[in-house]
Amino acid sequence: MIVNIKKYIQNKFFKIGFNTILNVKKKYEIINKASKHKIGKFSFGNKNKHKIFYVIKRTPGAGFFSNLLYVIKNLDIAEKNNYIPIVDMCNFPTMYNQKININNKKNIWEIYFKQTSNFNLKDVYKSKNVYFSPSKFKFRYEIYKKKKYKKIFDKYIKVDKKILTIVDKFVNKYFKDEKILGIHFRGTDQLIAPNHSHPPTIFEIENLIEKKVLKGDFDKIFLLTEDLRYFNRLKKKYKELIYSYDYFRAKNIEDFSNSKRRNHRNKLGFENLVEAITLSKCNKIVFCESNISMFAIFYSNFKISKYHLNNGIKSSNTLISRFSWYLSIYLPKLLKYYFKIQF
């Protein structure tokens, strides 16, 4: 009874992420259940008898860079055991899958990255020795802080050329001969998500821009935020100082699910990756710890200069985390900002 009430409250008031995802077919649901807490082993035929494949799958998964972390961690497992890794985000759909994906790609991993081996899923599902990654698998974004995982990333993961071309064109157009301060500024679900960093307030960001950009330490700002209210306010106030992509932003968490644009979910992952790699090209970044900012530092090979706005971590309790940012971070910063203006 208590569990059911808790689930109702979470679904009614604390929904984070997309409302629905694609269904997992019965064959793969059986595999998913069998490999829920441990690596599962299956045989699908007599092909590739002397090879061991490791299928990396996570359904429904979570945010784009959380899913990427999961893949990196499991690539490490494959490496240690001499398994041949392959990512399956086709039969095990994530929240970024759609019925018809960009370029009719069945496996959405291949929208963003090259496959992690030279084999394809058709060959794998005819093979004798196939292992599957566990669904319930604990990991944290601290993985993005470790150089050993950057070596794994560099060995197995190649970003799609279209994404790299977009980044290169943007950087060459706007960053050349400019000193760029990158600001990754979360809103929407980051304000209430349990066990995540308290993001900075708009007041902290404006104060930082006044000190670091308007006083001449930097020429321009690369702004990365999914929150439309934050973006509009900063763009209106600082105008030509701000560079950014014209990508999807939202006022409310629900907007991520309700958007009617074509290939919306595919595009969110694509846009996240473009912006994060661009962030890694800045001279310095301002961030609170989140997967996007941590990936940018990771992608730069830990060389980028950084300024951490640390407001602490929210509780793992859903109810407490729903209000903690507003009461412990936003309200004190608002009062400080208000009285500073008044007096």
Image (cartoon, rainbow, N blue to C red):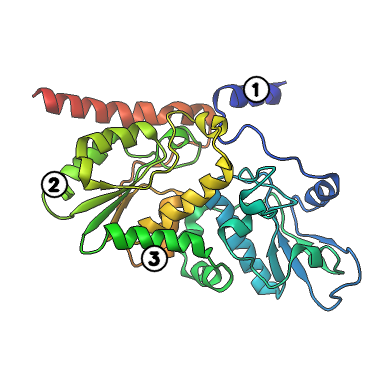
Residue name at image x 80 percent, y 67 percent:
123
Indicate the position of residue 342 as horizontal and vertical percent values. 11, 22
Closer-to-camera residue (216/6): 216
Q: CA distance from mark 2 to mark 1?
A: 48 Å
Q: Residue 214: which disc?
A: 2
* Earlier sequence position, callout 3 versus callout 1: 1
Closer-to-camera residue (208/121): 121
Q: Amino acid at mark 2?
A: Leu
Q: Residue 135: which disc?
A: none
Indicate the position of residue 9 as horizontal and vertical percent values. 60, 22
Which residue is disc 3 drawn over?
Answer: 300
Q: Is residue 207 above or below residue 320?
A: below
Q: Amino acid at mark 3?
A: Ser
| Quadrant in which residue 14 is drawn | top right
Could you tell whether 84 is left or right of 330 in the image? Answer: right
Q: Which of the image's four quarters has the C terminus?
A: top left
Which residue is disc 1 drawn over?
Answer: 8
Of circles 3 and 1, the one toward us is 3
Q: Secondary structure at mark 2?
A: loop
